[in-house]
Image (cartoon, rainbow, N blue to C red):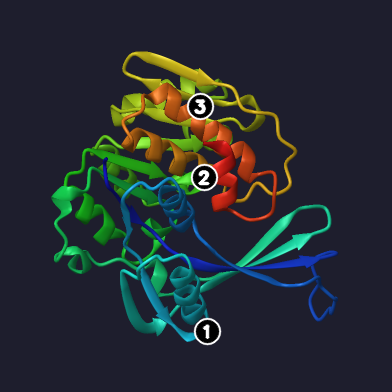
Amino acid sequence: MEKTLVIGSCTVDIVIPTPRLPSTTDSINSGVHHYALGGCAYNVSQMLRLLSVPYLHGVTIGSGIYGDFVKKELDKKGVPVFRTSPEPHGACICLVEESGERSFVAYHGIEYKFNREWFKSLDLSTFSNVYLCGLELEEDTGEEIVRFLEENRFENIYFAPGPRLLTIKKEFVKRIFALNPIIHLNDQEIISYTKDSDINRAMKILRAMTGNDVIVTMGKDGASILTSEGFIYEKSRESIVVDSIGAGDCHLGTYISYRSMGKDKREALEKANLFASEVVRHEGSTLSEKDISLLI
C-alpha cells in the first residue's frame, strides 16, 4: 500500500459559540468553549489513520499550553510525534455566531514552519505521495517547502491550496505547478483562480497549467475529476449540514486513502463524497472510528 508524507500544521482549534461578534470595548457572554486538534494537514492525516493507510505527518509540536494539548491528544490516538521544539505552539480561535457565521483569530507557531533538514534522516523513497495545503507556503519558510518538493520527486503531489491559491507567491505556484501536482479545490476556489464560471472549462484551464488531474468539489452537487481521459463525476449523498469545517480535508484525505489502496479514481471519488457528506452532519472537522465503521 502506498505511503503518504503529510506536510502542514497540527494546531489547536478553540471554538467559541457567541450570539454575535463583540464590538470594541464590548463584553458578551459566550457558550462553552471547545478545544480540538485542527488544521488542514492534520484533518487529512486523520483520514489516512482512520482508514489504516500508512503515512507520516511531518509537523513540529511546540511548547506551552497548546503544544502540551497537542501532545496529549496525539498520544490518546496513538499517533507518534514527528519532532518537538521549545518554540511556542499556536492556536486558532473560532468565533461561531448564532447565524452560523465564523470569524477566526489565529496565532501561527512553530507548527507552521518547515525545514528540509528535518527530513534528512528519512528514507523518502518509501513515500509515494506527498500532501500540501496553502497556508504553510505563506510562511517565511515557504521557500523551504518548494525546494523540498523540487529536490525529492514523489509519484503524486496532492496540492490543496484552497482560496490561498490567489495569495501565495506566484513564483511558488508556478514552481509547484511545474511538478505536475494533483490539484484539489472547491468550485468557488477554481472559479476565482481561473476567472471562468464554467466549472468544466475552469478545470481544463487548470489542467493545462499542471498537466495532471484536477479534483473539484461542489458541495451537494457532487465532485468531478478531470483526468487525461476526460471527466469523472460522482454525485453526493444528501446531508443536513451542521458544520462544513474540514469537509474538503476529509474529501481529499479519503481520496488519497482509497487511491493508496489501489482503488480506481471513480471509486476513490465516490468514497470521498460519501465520507465528506458524513463529516458535515456533525460538529468537528474529522470523523470518529465509529463513523468510519458505519461507512466502510
Name the residue at 39% across, 65% down: 79
Using the numbered discs, state the Cα–Cα distance from disc 2 to disc 3 in whole angstroms. Answer: 13 Å
Secondary element at image label 1: helix
- Mark 2 is on which residue type? Cys
Q: Nearer the viewer, residue 117 or 266?
A: 266
Against 22, is 195 above or below? above
**Apparent side of residue 32 relative to residue 139 in the rendered image (left or right):** right
Q: Residue furthest top?
A: 229
How many neighbours does mark 1 have within 10 angstroms: few (below 14), some (14-19), or many (20 or more)? few
| Coordinates of residue 46 in the picture (x, y in percent) | 46, 54
Q: Quadrant of residue 118?
A: bottom left
Secondary element at image label 2: helix
| Coordinates of residue 8 in the picture (x, y in percent) | 39, 59
Question: Which of marks 3 and 1 precedes in the sequence?
Answer: 1
**Apparent side of residue 280 relative to residue 265 in the rendered image (left or right):** right
Residue marked by disc 1: 65
How many neighbours does mark 2 have within 10 angstroms: few (below 14), some (14-19), or many (20 or more)? many
Q: Is residue 191 visible?
A: no
Residue 250 tag number: 2
Residue marked by disc 3: 270
